[in-house]
Image: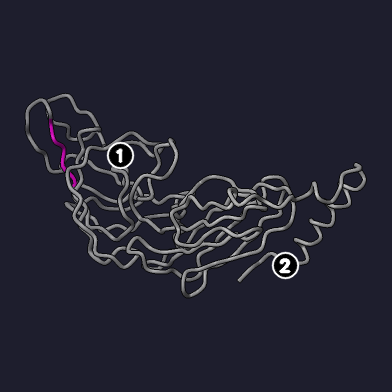
């Protein structure tokens, strides 16, 4: 399952030892034996960390193991010396780490086909902290298709549905694109096999793709749109089409497109 060969790890270890010798350092300075306190596992996993081992388990949001997930263990000191692994049929992965004074971080991603298109998702880690090779680490991962990602960048595991309001046939009142409301009805199971729910009336937020409903779990949706006027209280039905489509209609069925490390649907909407 591993893409990094053992001899590449040994080669880098030997290079580090040679460099230490040239600098007059003792081999013991390269990787000292960790104290027992350093081995404490804070990830919440049932497994304990082991010296010079990185390991973990990959599951979906229902706690079921996932096979074939790509796990990348990145050496923060050396360029282009990642350890690349894939989870087994029980969702587990494991790899030795070189006996070097390095700091490592682990990430994971899964790629799945859905209605003829391929999508890649970042997985939620049990911890985003770096770790020393000498202490080892347990890093579990969960595939979530909705929810906020770790960190403060405001991103979500779900995709976004962006709208572009055409200024045609406008009613006689002030129009603001943030008052567009969508109803998204899943027409098939979601990409992870779970049953989706109708999403309706969420307030859009402004994103790099324009005004959008965010954190939508990836699925195939039938979408309708309205304009909910805060001034008059009227609700206007809107015509809708997917960006690039030829014809507006009262509803449209859409799949997501991959956009960087996220997914999106782009819509054009206009007054009837």
How far apart are labels 1 and 2 at the CA level? 50 Å
* Above or below 181: residue 61: below
Look at the magenta stretch and give its main secondary structure.
strand
6 is within the stretch colored magenta: no
Instruction: Give the number of the mark in front: 1 or 2.
Output: 2
Q: Residue at x 25, y 66 (%)?
A: 188
Mark 1 burial class by Cα count in 10 Å: few <14, some 14-19, many 20+:
some
Q: Specify the farthest residue to the front.
A: 36
Q: Which residues are magenta?
A: 225-229
Q: Is residue 208 left or right of residue 212?
A: right
Q: Which residue is mark 2?
A: 5
Q: Is residue 107 left or right of residue 200?
A: right
Spot occupied by residue 85 in the image (x, y as percentages of width and height): 59, 65
* Above or below 169: residue 241: below
Spot occupied by residue 156 in the image (x, y as percentages of width and height): 38, 45
Spot occupied by residue 104 in the image (x, y as percentages of width and height): 63, 49
Q: Specify the farthest residue to the bottom.
A: 89
Q: How is the image coloured?
A: one colour
Q: Is residue 18 left or right of residue 268?
A: right
* Front residue of 239 and 145: 145
Mark 2 burial class by Cα count in 10 Å: few <14, some 14-19, many 20+:
few
* Front residue of 126 and 181: 126
Q: Is residue 22 left or right of residue 271?
A: right
Q: Residue at x 38, y 66 (%)?
A: 114
* Front residue of 112 and 118: 112
Quadrant into which the N terminus falls: bottom right
Q: Residue at x 28, y 43 (%)?
A: 213
Q: Which residue is mark 1?
A: 164
* Front residue of 121 and 89: 89
Quarter assignment of residue 46: bottom left
Q: Secondary structure under badge 1?
A: strand
């Amino acid at each position: 399952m591993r893409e990094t060969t053992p001899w590449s790890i040994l080669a880098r270890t030997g290079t580090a030892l040679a460099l230490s010798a040239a600098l007059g350092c003792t081999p013991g300075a390269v990787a000292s034996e960790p104290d027992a306190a350093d081995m404490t596992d804070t990830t919440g996993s049932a497994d304990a960390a082991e010296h010079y081992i990185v390991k973990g388990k990959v599951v979906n949001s229902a706690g079921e193991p996932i096979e074939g997930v790509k796990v990348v263990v990145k050496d923060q000191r050396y360029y282009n010396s990642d350890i690349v692994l894939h989870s087994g049929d029980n969702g587990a992965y494991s790899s030795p780490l070189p006996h070097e004074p390095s700091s490592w971080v682990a990430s994971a991603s899964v790629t799945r086909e859905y209605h003829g298109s391929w999508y890649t998702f970042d997985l939620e880690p049990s911890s985003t902290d770096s770790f020393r090779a000498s202490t080892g680490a347990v890093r579990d991962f969960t595939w979530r298709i909705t929810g906020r990602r770790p960190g403060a960048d405001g991103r979500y595991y779900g995709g976004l549905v962006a709208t572009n309001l055409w200024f045609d046939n406008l009613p006689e009142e002030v129009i603001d694109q943030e008052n567009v409301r969508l109803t998204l009805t899943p027409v098939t199971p979601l990409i992870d096999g779970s049953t989706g729910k109708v999403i309706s009336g969420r307030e859009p937020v402004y994103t790099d793709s324009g005004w959008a409903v965010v954190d939508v779990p990836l699925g195939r949706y039938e979408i309708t749109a309205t304009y909910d006027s805060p001034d008059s209280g009227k609700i206007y039905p809107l015509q809708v089409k997917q960006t690039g489509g030829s014809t507006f209609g009262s509803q449209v069925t859409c799949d997501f497109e991959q956009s960087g490390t996220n997914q999106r649907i782009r819509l054009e909407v206009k007054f009837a």
